[in-house]
Each structure stands twice: as C-alpha cells, then as structure tokens.
Image (spheres, coloured by chain):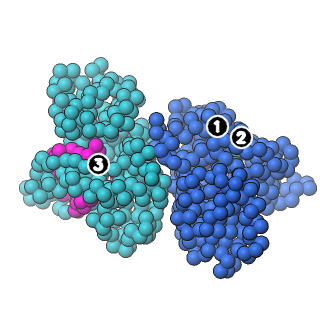
Chain colours: A blue, B cyan
Amino acid sequence: MDLLAPGMEPPPITRFDVETAAERILGRVRRTPVLDLGPFSLGGIPGELVLKLELLQHTGSFKPRGAFNRTLSAEVDDAGVIAASGGNFGLGVAFAARELGHRAEVFVPSTSPKMKIDRIRAYGAEVRVVPGYYADALEACEERALHTGALFMHAYDQPEVVAGQGTIALELSDQVPAIDTVLVAVGGGGLIGGIAAWFAGEVRVVGVEPALCPTLTAALEAGRPVDVQVGGIAADALGARRLGDIPFEICRRFVDRVALVSDDAIEVARRRLWDEIHLVVEPGAAAPIAALLSGAYDPEPDERVVALVSGANTDPGSLID
Amino acid sequence: MDLLAPGMEPPPITRFDVETAAERILGRVRRTPVLDLGPFSLGGIPGELVLKLELLQHTGSFKPRGAFNRTLSAEVDDAGVIAASGGNFGLGVAFAARELGHRAEVFVPSTSPKMKIDRIRAYGAEVRVVPGYYADALEACEERALHTGALFMHAYDQPEVVAGQGTIALELSDQVPAIDTVLVAVGGGGLIGGIAAWFAGEVRVVGVEPALCPTLTAALEAGRPVDVQVGGIAADALGARRLGDIPFEICRRFVDRVALVSDDAIEVARRRLWDEIHLVVEPGAAAPIAALLSGAYDPEPDERVVALVSGANTDPGSLID
C-alpha cells in the first residue's frame, strides 16, 4: 500500500486531519472504552478479540464525532444546519446542534426505525420523513438546503465528517497495543474512511458489508463508487446507495479487503452480543461480529482483532425470546 | 476510620487477600472497562462521573469473580459445588463450574426472574426453585449440602467470595486516577465488602440500598447484621434478608455512609441509562445511579465519583416505551 504511487493523488484525509478533529471535538464526545475478550471468545472466534464500544457514544452511535467536527469547522448562522440520514447521522447532527445552540433540520427515509426518528425530534431537530431509502432523503435535503442557506452536513462524504469519525482510530491506537486488524461496518464509508485514513496501512482495515448493501465491494470492483441496490435488516444504518468519493479514495489505498455477511449472520451476532456480553447492538453495528462468527473474516490464531461496535439504536425488545 | 481501634479485630479481608484473588482468577474473568461521563452527566449530576461497566462481565454480573476465587481456593470432588442465589450468584457459580469442569447445583427463590433461572440451567447447573426469597433458597441449599458433600459456596459471606468481588476495586485503582467516591449497591454485602476492603478508607465507599431492602442500614443501626423485610423491584439481586457477618466487619470500618433509594428512582435510573448511555441494566445495578439522580447521594462539584454498574440480567424488553 504505497502512499503516493505514480499517478495517485494524496489521500483526501490524512492523519493530521484526524488529529485536528480530535482536538476540535475534545470534551464534546465520549472517549469510548474497549473490552478485551481474549482468545476464543464468543464461542470460539480465533485470534484475540477486542471490542471498541462506540455504541456507548452520545446518541448511541459514532456519528456525533463527524457532526461536531463539521459544525465546529464552519460558520453557522441562524439558518442552522441541515442533513439527511438513515437515522444515526441525524441523531449526531441534532445532538451537536443542540449542544452548540444551532437550529437543525433532518431528512430521514421512511425506512428508518421509529425510535431513531423520535429521538432526532427529542433532540430538538425538525424532522422530515421522505419515502424510500437514504438516497431519497438526501435528494430532498439537498434541494431544501439551497433554499434555507443552512450549513449542509453530509453523512459521509465531507472531509470534516470523515476526519471526525477517524478519531475513533486515534483513540484505539492509544487504548489497544499491537492491533493487527480492525473490522469496520461500511455504508457510505465515512466511518471506515476515517479509520483507514488514520491507520494509513499500518493496521489491516477490513470492511464488513451486509450482502444486501455492498457499496464498497461494488466500488472496489468498478474502480469507482457506483450505485447498488440496498435492503435488508441493516439498511437503516448501512443503506447508502453508493460509497462516498472521499471514502473511496481512502479505501482503495488503505482497506485490505471487504467481507460480506448475510442478514441471518447479523441476527446471530446481535443475539450473541446480548447473550454473552450484554450489549444491545443495532443490526449494522453487529456486522463485524457477524463476519467473525460466520467465518467471512477468519483471523489467524495470534491475530489481535478489534471489532468496532458502532451503534445501539435499536429496539431492545427485539432481543426477547 | 482507624484500622485497629482498641478492641477491634483486624478486618476479615485485607488488600492482600484481594490481590491474591486477582492473581488466582486472572484470565477467568473479564477486566471490565470504565466509561468517563465527565461533569454534569445524565442531565446534570454534579461531580465527575465514571461508570465501571461490570455488567459486561461474564454472565452479566460481577459474581463470577467471587465464584472463581472460592472454587479455585478449594478442593472440589465429584459432588461438585452447591449454592443458593437470587440469580446472579447462581449464574456465576454455574459459569465457573462449567469452565472448571465441576458439577453445580443451584437453589433459587421463586421470586427470581425466569431469565436468570433459564440461564443458570443453560450453563449446565441443576436448578432447584424454592418458594420465597433468597433466604428460603439458602436454607434449602444448606440442608442439601450436608447430604451431597458438594463444596458450599455462599453468595456473600465467605472470605474468598468477598475477596473475589474486591478485584473490581483493584482494577478501578488502575483505571481511574484520583477517585474520591465509589457508589456500590448493597444486598448481602459481598460486593461492597470486597470493594471497601480494597480501598480500606483511602476512597469514600458509599453503599446504596433500595429502601425496600435496607440490610446495611439496619446492620449499622443495630451494630450487627439483623433480619429485615425485603421486597421491591431489586429484590432478586439485593434481597438478602440480612447482611453477611464478613461484609459487616468490613463495612462498619470502611463504609462512609448508606444512601437509600426508592423503586421509582431505580426505574428512572434504568431508563436514563438506556436512553443516554445505551446500557441495559437490571434494577439492583441501577441503584447507584438512582442515588445520584435522586440526590440521595449529592457529590461536590469537583468530586470524582465512580458508580459501579454491576448487572445486566434483566429483560431488555422492559425498556420499551
């Protein structure tokens, strides 16, 4: 993985951008803890498994990191901020806006869980529900942003958003010695983009996608982000129709491979995380554990693997027998 | 708090016992992480609040620490181990027995949640359900132990069990600098006994009890453990009828005070922990947060408070609106 191979532009986000983001959002976000599960955890996963418990972040997902970094990098006037989101980014935007005293307007697709929509409202944002998936909400949002003049926040394709998500990796470098591999769920690519930008090839970064939302797989095959069909149980978190351009430029350099997981494997992983760790995890955030349990990613016996557990915005009642 | 005031015996558990326990159970239990919530967290709790996430321990509570320490300190023959428990200690005993290859028999009261009983069975233990509360299960268990010759494991009144629970405090000393105060839920007193034995007056240890299960309050008032009425929503975890003698000897030296909380305050705390931290916490384990939210314990603005969140064995569906 050559940082500046002939004909390649430098990556759009660097380690320095992530460090700057970390300073900017310090005190605004939680430094989330890690849980070391040791070898043969969760019924026999090879390698040493460590969970990064980013689901304990404000709003129940990693999104406030990017939302704060974007908002604090810009001038925001009375029109406030505006965003489209499957739910979690909307929560992050609404939370950051409330903390910073800005107005927020959030477009969500009708396929988002009611609990996410209700919570965005509870943070004081105006919510507009748009029929369809994330891409439909994004279209409506972009049109509206042109009229209101609010600061447009992109869920995964803005440098400040990607650099903000990368602060998780900066924390990990401090929390976990000698990481071999980090497993990260992929939707639009903001999270994996930030993480891969930080590690920059020094740690193996593996993307995990539901087979029904294969944006990174398709982009790597095509050599550029392309539209894919999205669906399945994790679509509210990972259901971007195509990978972002900024994440793509980072991922094609620094992502080692992509593992695909079925919806069934995601459900098994969610159940296992509740039964054995007592964490309630939303489907998209269970994808890395699904990759380990299903063998879609199969660590070496001495490999130290960090699985990012990135969101908890789900109905806990769905875990009842 | 004088360690050896005239006429006082030395405390039954010392720091050395806790260190020995930590070495003995190393690799058997998870080192649970802490989550730093900073000042004015959870809607405005004064002081700097840190959560010790012991609910992420194997079996969803702290109990395996004491169970492993007791089991590994003794000779166990084919008769295996035997215990009585409101549920969590039974889980700890059953888990430790499975890991160490021993037979386990666990007596639980009929008031224990079905999920705890089912899980004890799932770890391979023989379960006997006794009508009533913990004390009733304990009586039946003691009688049975005399016949089978199994190793009797007491949920909170054996030195090895108390020292094992104290390993949480040993970890805390390493994880959180300059702790002022630790808030710990109290039932039979094994947990607070171990923790107070470790800190030995160097850190303020505050017990938190449901007003409906006031074993430590009653013991401190009477100058010795006495029977109390138990009931309410946390009785399955904190519903011992009287404090243990070993915990009492430690608590009367090293526990600063006891805060009492209502069942309503516990329910508010559980809800808040889900809404704002995305943790599913059982009623007994929410008691320390209930003390902070209700003002039953009111930290100074610059006080660094650790709240021990000690169990997650509850139906997550109970958090649905």
Residue at point 67%, 47% (across, down): A235
Q: Classify 10 Å Cα crowding around label 1: few (below 14), some (14-19), many (20 and above).
A: some
**Rendered location of residue A7, percent (x, y):** 92, 55
Q: Which residues are magenta?
A: B235-261
Quadrant (top left, top right, bottom left, bottom right) of the N terminus of chain B: bottom left
The kind of residue on which mark 2 rests is Leu
Q: Quadrant of residue B274?
A: bottom left
Q: Is residue B241 magenta?
A: yes
Calculate the distance from the C-alpha at mark 1 to the C-alpha at mark 2: 8 Å
Decide: marks 2, 3 in contact (CB < 8 A)? no
Residue A178 marker: none
Subunit bearing disc 1: A
Q: Which residue is mark 2?
A: A212
Q: Which residue is mark 1?
A: A263
Decide: marks 1, 2 in contact (CB < 8 A)? yes
Q: Is residue B43 magenta?
A: no
The kind of residue on which mark 1 rests is Asp
Helix, strand or loop at label 3? It is loop
Calculate the distance from the C-alpha at mark 2 to the C-alpha at mark 3: 43 Å
**Rendered location of residue A321, percent (x, y):** 46, 35
Subunit bearing disc 3: B
